[in-house]
Image (cartoon, rainbow, N blue to C red):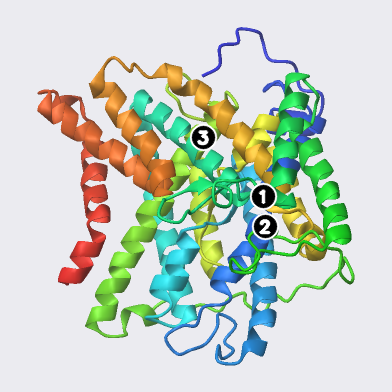
């Protein structure tokens, strides 16, 4: 909620008026910087999604490309296809978010959703059938938006829970950043530990540490473009280190001091033509005709995908809007319905593109932290994704260790909202607390929101204040109970 009482600056051009750049206290240069920062902090999906979607065989032993998984030679071209389709779909739907909803939110294949598709769904059906489920999930969400249900749920969430969601996501992306840089990892006998065996070892971690220090100092000095400067500068350092020392990637744990994801090495041409042959490989009905057991499992899968996508987006919108002071007095952004419609269409587009459901990315908060306030930043991010179709080798020069400091720093910025929860009142404080801690500890935005909703309803009932719970929150709380019990229900069925 904005605390400013100054009149908005008059628009300077048609572009300014359409996106509301001056009205939101921004500038074109600021939007461009923010859009580029968002792109660089989420560009890893171009490399990571192919490793998930492009390497798993379906029930017939085929890759998502349709090629047999039994031949290792089929994996590299399949990975290239998934990378191209991932960038294309992300670019289109992010530009759509910028021009229709005019909100600084970028979209791409959702992590977690793609893993569920690859490791749970594909082994039971064919890849085209799995992508058909994603299309149905997006269609159902779109119907919920157009009927007003999704927006009504969004507006029914209490302010304290919204704060808990924003702070929880701040903790979540901090963990994502620290994990992506290798600063925290799974330990021997412990859920996580510092670096390797409790020590910060290797040049890639050094790149992260120096990048974080540089970013903090630039931000404190109020240098414009602090995040973008940090990302670009540390990418250059990483390229030099790799060319001189030949550090290499981690390679399934065999080189623990290597680069976590992208190896910043210049090899061959920086220009490549994309292979977009994955587009349209969809079977909308096959997954529901594969036998009773599979059909029931697929309905449960669509339900789980629906809830995860539904509430991940809600949490992301709240967090990004709060970080950019883009929410009204009730905690809602402008054009809420348009934002939710585009997000729903993005899920459908992800299925049609054979790259899994596309959803709103919390990394957008990094761009907002850099100054993005309007949909123009999303247009910049989307164009960068489209350009990456042809410059994939150049995009892959940015290692996660160079981009992760921006995520950690934005996590810090988002924690400032924790003061808006009354921690002396357990009725308000504990549901917010449950939301905050479950997101990073369960590594799931959806799990955090679900825990908060359920505890909110339970505490109100125990306090004799059940009438204060919005009817829609009862529906959602029950849905989340089913969501958490999905494994038990699946086993019984």
Residue 311 can be seen, yes or no: no
Q: Left of 457 or right of it: where is 124?
A: right
Which numbered circle lies on residue 201? 1
Q: Secondary structure at mark 2?
A: loop
- Quarter of the C terminus within the rendering: bottom left
| Disc with the residue nearer the chain's start (2 vs 1) | 1
C-alpha span from label 3 to label 1: 26 Å
C-alpha span from label 2 to label 3: 27 Å
Residue in the picture at 31% in, 43% down: 450
Q: Is 157 situated above or below 342?
A: above
| Disc with the residue nearer the chain's start (2 vs 3) | 3
The one of 492 and 188 positioned closer to us in this rendering: 188
Q: Secondary structure at mark 3?
A: helix
The answer to whether marks 2 and 1 mark residues whose Cβ atoms lie closer than 8 Å is: yes
Q: Left of 449 or right of it: where is 366?
A: right
Q: Left of 308 or right of it: where is 255?
A: right
Image coordinates of residue 427 in percent, x first then y, are 23, 23
Which numbered circle lies on residue 441? none
Residue in the picture at 51% in, 19% down: 1
The one of 191 and 61 positioned closer to us in this rendering: 191
Which numbered circle lies on residue 257? 2
Residue in the picture at 21% in, 36% down: 471
Which numbered circle lies on residue 170? 3
Residue in the picture at 61% in, 50% down: 182
């Amino acid at each position: 909620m904005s605390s400013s009482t100054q009149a908005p600056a008059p628009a300077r051009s048609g572009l300014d008026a359409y996106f509301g750049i001056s009205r939101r206290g921004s500038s074109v240069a600021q939007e461009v910087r923010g859009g580029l920062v968002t792109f660089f902090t989420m560009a890893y999906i171009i490399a990571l999604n192919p490793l998930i979607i492009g390497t798993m065989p379906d029930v017939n032993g085929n890759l998502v490309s349709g090629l047999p998984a039994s031949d290792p030679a089929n994996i590299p071209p399949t990975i290239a296809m998934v990378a191209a389709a991932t960038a294309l779909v992300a670019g289109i739907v992010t530009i759509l978010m910028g021009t229709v909803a005019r909100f600084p939110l970028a979209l791409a294949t959702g992590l977690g959703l793609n893993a569920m598709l690859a490791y749970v769904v594909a082994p039971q059906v064919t890849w085209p059938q799995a992508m058909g489920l994603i299309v149905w999930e997006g269609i159902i969400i779109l119907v919920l938006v157009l009927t007003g249900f999704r927006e009504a749920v969004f507006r029914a969430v209490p302010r304290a829970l919204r704060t808990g969601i924003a702070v929880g996501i701040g903790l979540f992306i901090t963990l994502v950043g620290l994990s992506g840089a290798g600063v925290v990892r799974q330990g021997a006998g412990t859920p996580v530990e510092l670096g390797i065996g409790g020590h910060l070892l290797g040049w890639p971690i050094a790149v992260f540490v120096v990048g974080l220090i540089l970013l903090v100092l630039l931000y404190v000095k109020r240098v414009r473009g602090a995040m973008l400067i940090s990302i670009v500068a540390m990418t250059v350092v990483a390229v030099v280190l790799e060319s001189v020392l030949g550090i290499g990637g981690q390679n399934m744990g065999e080189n623990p001091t290597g680069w976590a994801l992208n190896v910043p090495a210049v090899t061959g041409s920086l220009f490549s033509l994309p292979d977009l042959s994955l587009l349209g490989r969809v079977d909308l009905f096959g997954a529901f005709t594969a036998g009773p057991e599979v059909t029931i499992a697929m309905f449960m899968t669509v339900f789980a995908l629906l809830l995860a996508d539904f509430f991940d987006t809600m949490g992301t919108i709240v967090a990004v809007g709060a970080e950019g002071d883009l929410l009204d007095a009730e905690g809602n952004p402008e054009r809420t319905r348009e934002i939710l419609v585009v997000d729903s269409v993005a899920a459908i587009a992800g299925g049609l593109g054979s790259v899994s459901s596309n959803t709103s990315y919390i990394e957008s908060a990094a761009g907002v932290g850099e100054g993005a306030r309007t949909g123009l930043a999303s247009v910049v991010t989307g164009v960068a994704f489209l350009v990456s179709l042809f410059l994939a080798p150049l995009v892959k020069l940015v290692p996660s260790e160079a981009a992760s400091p921006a995520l950690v720093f934005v996590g810090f910025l988002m924690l400032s909202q924790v003061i808006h929860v009354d921690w002396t009142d357990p009725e308000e404080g504990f549901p917010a607390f449950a939301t905050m801690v479950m997101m990073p500890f369960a590594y799931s935005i959806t799990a955090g929101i679900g825990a908060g909703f359920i505890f909110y309803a339970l505490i109100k009932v125990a306090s004799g204040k059940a009438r204060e719970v919005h009817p829609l929150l009862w529906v959602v709380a029950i849905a989340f109970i089913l969501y958490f019990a999905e494994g038990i229900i699946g086993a019984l069925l």
